[in-house]
Amino acid sequence: MYKATLAYAQQLDKEDKLSYLREQFHIPKDKQGNDWLYFTGNSLGLQPKQTQQYIQQELDDWAKFGVEGHFEAKNPWMPYHEFLTEKMAKIVGAKPLEVVVMNTLTTNLHLLMVSFYQPTKAKYKIVIESDAFPSDRYAVQSQLKFHGFDPEKGLIEWKPRAGEELLRIEDLEQIVSEQGDEIALLLIGGVNYYTGQYLDLKRIAEIGHAKNCMVGIDLAHGAGNISPKLHDSGVDFAAWCTYKYLNSGPGSLAGLFVHEKHAYNKELPRFAGWWNHNKETRFNMRQPFDVMAGGEGWQLSNPPILSMAAIKASLDMFDKVGMDALRQKSEKLTGYFEFLINQIDTDRIKIITPSNPKERGCQLSIQVKNADKSLHQNLTENNIITDWREPDVIRCAPVPMYNSFEDVFRMVEILKGLL
């Protein structure tokens, strides 16, 4: 049983086999030089100290070799994206064939929908969560309009029940059972940005495929947070950013997954570019387009090396630690966090994230009664960095790579005082 004392939190940190990782990150500090209590890895992950070295290596090789760095650099730029593939595939539970790092998240979703959203007059609708991240909503609305459909009629929302915050999988099952003949695509956030709910991807895939619907997953809040096991889930495609839990820096590149069952289908419609053409004949220049197999078949342009160097720095850390160990610590951190919040004698706040650790990542969403942003602003003034999501939620993410149990204890003590 957890204890609500500083000594207990410090003892948990002493027992934590991953506590050494915190020293490998830059922790922002206040004006007095004290570490911020940073709980926004779900928005922007902190910088690993080795990132500068990784980027500097590419700057040095650019200075030293110029264009020859494509072949002569310590990490040759020509195949650089391949250095990321295997480690990224481990994080999301995929085969290397199925994964590529490229572009940014919403760009990747659009490129994937070129291939996997193939509407007909009868079967054209798209299912999303009612509280999907706005970018996903805008993306599918624009796809519907692009194909000549009315987004008002073509968009189906999977909603929580009245008086509830969380989604029920049986409600999605009912939607698809009743309207599946009209649904072409399910595009679902694997971990909901607002509530932190981690959805059953395998079950979602089964529900969609039972009615011949394509199934895609937005893992923006999942990659590096939960273990989605994308290959085993059977979903057709997925995309995710890397600047949250994967600590790759603001606006950095995204990841893409296409299931192996589609890897060799050259007839899938897609946009083409130099970099998804067969790498063996790419530089022959005047060859007809010959698409590559697997995830690389969606990569259009040569990659930005400096951004990839930052991703490489982070992936090397993840590879040494492993997602299993990170998930174990994550569940314990959020369990302690949840325990402490529930000890506060107040009706002004409540946690809307699932209490079952298997149904959440490392985010807890705190709903504020009669909400305005004052509580969040007061936390910020106390050097506790969380984020506010309209209309009434403070999102807090104790990230297992760099947050401590003492962080959690101190945050809740300040929160208690403010309430």
Image (spheres, rainbow, N blue to C red):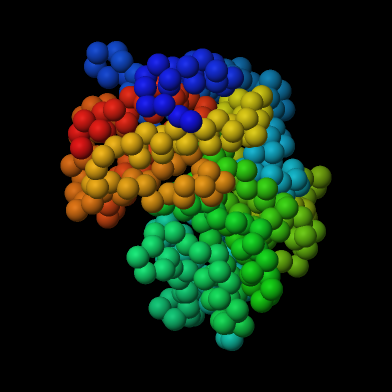
Q: Is residue 331 left or right of residue 235?
A: left
Residue 47: in sight, yes or no? Answer: no
Report the residue that reaches farthest toward the bottom. Answer: 122
Residue 319 image point, x, y percent: 66, 28
Which residue shows up at 68% across the image and 70% down it? 209
Report the residue that reaches farthest toward the front. Answer: 1
The C terminus: image quadrant: top left
The residue closer to the viewer here, 82 or 8, is 8
Which residue shows up at 48% across the image and 31% down it? 1
Residue 272 image point, x, y percent: 65, 58
The residue closer to the viewer here, 43 or 165, is 165
Residue 284 image point, x, y percent: 78, 47
The residue closer to the viewer here, 310 or 128, is 128
Tally the numbered discs.
0
Q: Quadrant of residue 3?
A: top left
Which residue shows up at 53% across the image and 36% down it? 331
Residue 33 image point, x, y percent: 29, 13
Which residue shows up at 26% across the image and 33% down it? 415
Residue 367: in sight, yes or no? Answer: yes
From this view, report whether residue 259 is shown above or below residue 211. above
The residue closer to the viewer here, 5 or 13, is 5
From this view, report whether residue 246 is shown above or below residue 7. below
From this view, report whether residue 401 is shown above or below residue 116. above
